[in-house]
Image (cartoon, grey):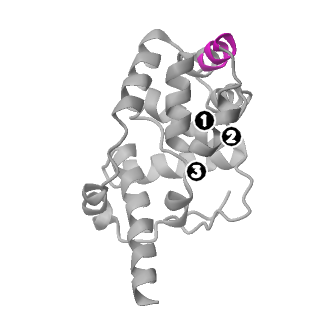
Amino acid sequence: MPDFALRFPPADIRPLAERFGYTDDAACERAGAAARSRGHYSRPEFVTVCRWKTPRSRPLVERNAAPAVERATRDALGSHGERERMQALVQLEGVGVPTASTLLHFAFPDDYPILDVRALESLGHTGKGTAYTIGFWLDYLEVCRELATRHGVSIRTLDKALWQHSKERAAATRASD
């Protein structure tokens, strides 16, 4: 298992999350809620969420036909196994583990963090050169769930705090240069 450890005091989780300023996720929240309700993402919802995570993958993501998106996302959302959920999603073109984590997050926001280099950095992992395997994701998921439980916060609150800590750290580093 990677050596993940929170790089800031746990008491800072809530204040960091409250400073999280990126709020352009309403369309993804609607898409995820609709997918959860019906049991799969529609192709337009899938493209919306994937584009939110990484606009660069859009040409690849758009190659997925509606039946393939429905089938893979139905398999993912209907599975109870974490590995199986990821395996179903990464079969789609343009979907790696970070994007698959985002699809799961918006469908089940209380259960899944978003795998992101900023969040990883706040857990002491540079992410550079890392192949984000499903095994890596499962370790990350376990650590995030454990941290959220131990510190009495939601997965999303922890997720925002991790991202915000990295952002503020990067800004402080740039300001001191």
Q: Residue 49 placed where, x, y %?
A: 50, 32
Task: Determine the secondary structure under disc 2.
Answer: loop
Q: CA distance from mark 2 to mark 3?
A: 15 Å
The three-letter code of the residue at mark 2 reads Gly
Q: Does residue 17 lie above or below 73 as drawn?
A: below
The three-letter code of the residue at mark 1 reads Ala
Q: Does residue 39 lie above or below 81 as drawn?
A: above
Residue count near mark 3 (Cα–Cα under 10 Å), binned few <14, some 14–19, many ≥20: many
The question of residue 119 being in magenta is answered with no
Q: CA distance from mark 3 to mark 1?
A: 14 Å
The three-letter code of the residue at mark 3 reads Tyr
Residue identifier under label 3: 140
Q: Going 27% across and 60% down the picture, which residue do you hit? A: 19
Q: Does residue 17 lie above or below 107 as drawn?
A: below
Q: Going 71% across and 25% down the picture, which residue do you hit? A: 63
Q: Residue 168 placed where, x, y %?
A: 38, 71
Task: Determine the secondary structure under disc 1.
Answer: helix
Q: Going 57% across and 44% down the picture, which residue do you hit? A: 54
Residue extending furthest toward the front: 59
Name the side, left or right, on which 14 lies relative to 161.
Answer: left
Q: Are marks 2 and 1 in contact (CB under 8 Å)?
A: yes
- Report the span colored magenta: 66-73
Residue 96 numbered tag: 2
Q: Earlier in the sequence, mark 2 or mark 3?
A: 2
Residue identifier under label 1: 100
Closer mark to the observer between disc 2 and disc 3 = 2
